[in-house]
Amino acid sequence: MEGGAESEPTRIMVAVNESSIKGYPHPSISSRSAFEWTLQKIVQSNTAGFKFLFLHVQVPDEDGFDGMDSIYASPGDFQEMKHRDKIRGIHLLEYFVKKCHEIGVPCEAWIKKGDAKEVICHEVKRVRPDILVVGSRGLGPFQRVFVGTVSEFCVKHAECPVITIKRKADDTPQDPVDD
């Protein structure tokens, strides 16, 4: 560098989500794969040259009850659901932040609520990362119609380069919608 000035690290935003497999409160297969690929192929050993920005978007369930058959509605029930969602989001981000600290890569992490594809693109506009990395479940055309695809939307609408990482065939659960 001329004059001894250090350059800013490359800021990589990684959109992460929880696994949808029941009884599995961990990062999704696609999120872990995207993060690990980015470490291996982009960061490599240059930990000082990069900064991770982890975004988790909590998507509200249509009825707000996350698949419950019934709920005994009291103010406490709703407070408990909000508290549980917050804890799960924090637990998810903790996984990625801990991994970064273990290898010495600086990072930030935060949670937003809303439609994942819209929120991710809004946060890209607000935070201005150098690159956005998103995992892709590799859904077929029929499933894409019903499930939608966050990664395709981000490729078209995010205001920065987007890298989509498909999960490996041997990491794919029996039902591709699961992640």
Image: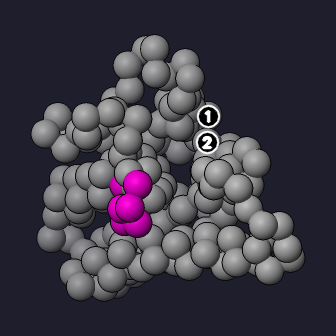
Question: Which image quarter: residue 19?
Answer: bottom left
Give me the residue at 18% from left, 39% from top: 168
**Is residue 21 visible in this depiction of the protein?**
yes
Instruction: Classify mark 2: helix, strand or loop.
Output: helix
Horizontal and vertical percent position of residue 78? 78, 71
Give me the residue at 25% from left, 40% from top: 173
Residue labelled with disc 1: 157
Q: Is residue 27 magenta?
A: yes
**Is residue 2 visible in this depiction of the protein?**
no
Residue labelled with disc 2: 117
Tell me where the magenta segment starts and ends, as one range: 22-28
Q: Nearer the viewer, residue 107 or 80?
A: 80
**Amino acid type shown at disc 1:** His
The single residue placed furthest to the top in the displayed view is 142
**Amino acid type shown at disc 2:** Lys
Horizontal and vertical percent position of residue 153? 57, 32
Mark 2 Cα shell of 10 Å, populated few (<14), some (14-19), many (≥20): some
Question: Which image quarter: residue 5?
Answer: bottom left
Whether residue 139 sits left or right of residue 47 in the image: it is right
Give me the residue at 49% from left, 22% from top: 144
Above-or-below relation of 39 to 9: above
Above-or-below relation of 134 to 89: above
Horizontal and vertical percent position of residue 27? 37, 62
Horizontal and vertical percent position of residue 38? 27, 56
Mark before the other along the chain sequence, 1 or 2: 2
Question: Which image quarter: residue 162?
Answer: top left
Q: CA distance from mark 1 to mark 2?
A: 9 Å
Mark 1 Cα shell of 10 Å, populated few (<14), some (14-19), many (≥20): some
Q: Main secondary structure of the magenta part?
A: loop
